[in-house]
Image (cartoon, rainbow, N blue to C red):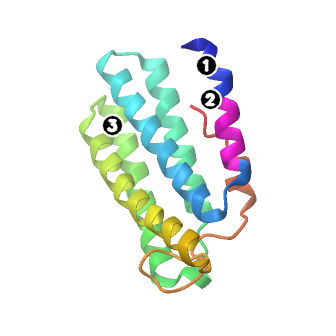
Amino acid sequence: MAANQPLAHRYREVAVKTANPLQLVVILYDAAINALQQAQGHIRSKDIARRAGSLNHSVAIISELQACLNFQEGGQIAHSLDRLYNYMKHRIFTANIEQRCEPLAEVISLLENLRAAWGELVTQHQNAAVPTAVPGSGKSGGIENGAPGLNSLNISG
């Protein structure tokens, strides 16, 4: 399977470079979920170094999502996401300190719910060419369009 790694990395790189801002958010949610699932495995196998790496990667992704929130355009939804991202990072730190999978399962569930909402937006955007929007807000720009961090964040774990 190691022979397929460069091909998979190139595929992810092309997907990120060709994605619109909504698709980038979904890609980041997928990467964060994947990193947390890997961290759960590392907790179970007591692999401290890899656990720390996976958790740090997930926190970096969540922090990037948080940094791209547009509070002026996104209004209350952006503020709610900001609080939720802070809560997620707190739960990840708790999981790391306590070396437990349960807080990570909670964060994975939250991320999966957010990913589903943003995935629906991607579908709507592709079907109707609507402006970028925050799920449920009716306002455009909850995430800065073309935010530089979204284009440069390393999502390969």
The magenta region covers: 8-16
What's the residue type where badge 2 is placed? Ala
Query: Could you tell me which quadrant the N terminus lies in?
Result: top right
Query: Which mark is first along the chain, 2 or 3?
Result: 2
Q: At numbered mark 3, what does the secondary structure look like: helix, strand or loop?
A: helix
Residue 91 versus residue 144: which sits nearer the camera? 144
What is the secondary structure assignment of the residue under circle 1? Answer: helix
Q: Could you tell me residue 31's position as x and y percent? A: 51, 42
Disc 3 versus disc 2: distance between alpha carbons?
A: 29 Å
Quarter occupied by residue 87? bottom left
The amino acid marked with disc number 3 is Ala
Res. 8 mark: 2
Mark before the other along the chain sequence, 1 or 3: 1
- At x 24%, y 39%, the residue is 102
Task: Establish if 17 lies above or below 41.
Answer: below
Local packing at callout 3 (Cα closer than 10 Å; few below 14, some 14-19, many 20+) is many
Q: Main structural element of the magenta stretch: helix, strand or loop? A: helix
**Decide: marks 2, 1 in contact (CB < 8 A)?**
yes
Point out the image quarter for the C terminus: top right
Q: How many residues crowd around disc 2 within 10 Å: few (fewer than 14), some, or many (20 or more)? A: few
Q: Residue at x 75, y 58 (%)?
A: 148
| Residue located beneath label 1 in the image | 4
Q: Which residue is mark 3?
A: 95
Helix, strand or loop at label 2? It is helix
The label number, if any, that marks residue 120 in the structure image:
none
Farthest front residue in view:
127
Quadrant assignment, res 40: top left
User: Does the CB distance between marks 3 and 2 fall below 8 Å?
Assistant: no
- Vertical arrangement, residue 140 with respect to residue 45, above or below: below
Amino acid under disc 1:
Asn
Q: CA distance from mark 2 to mark 1?
A: 6 Å
Left or right side of 103 for 93: right
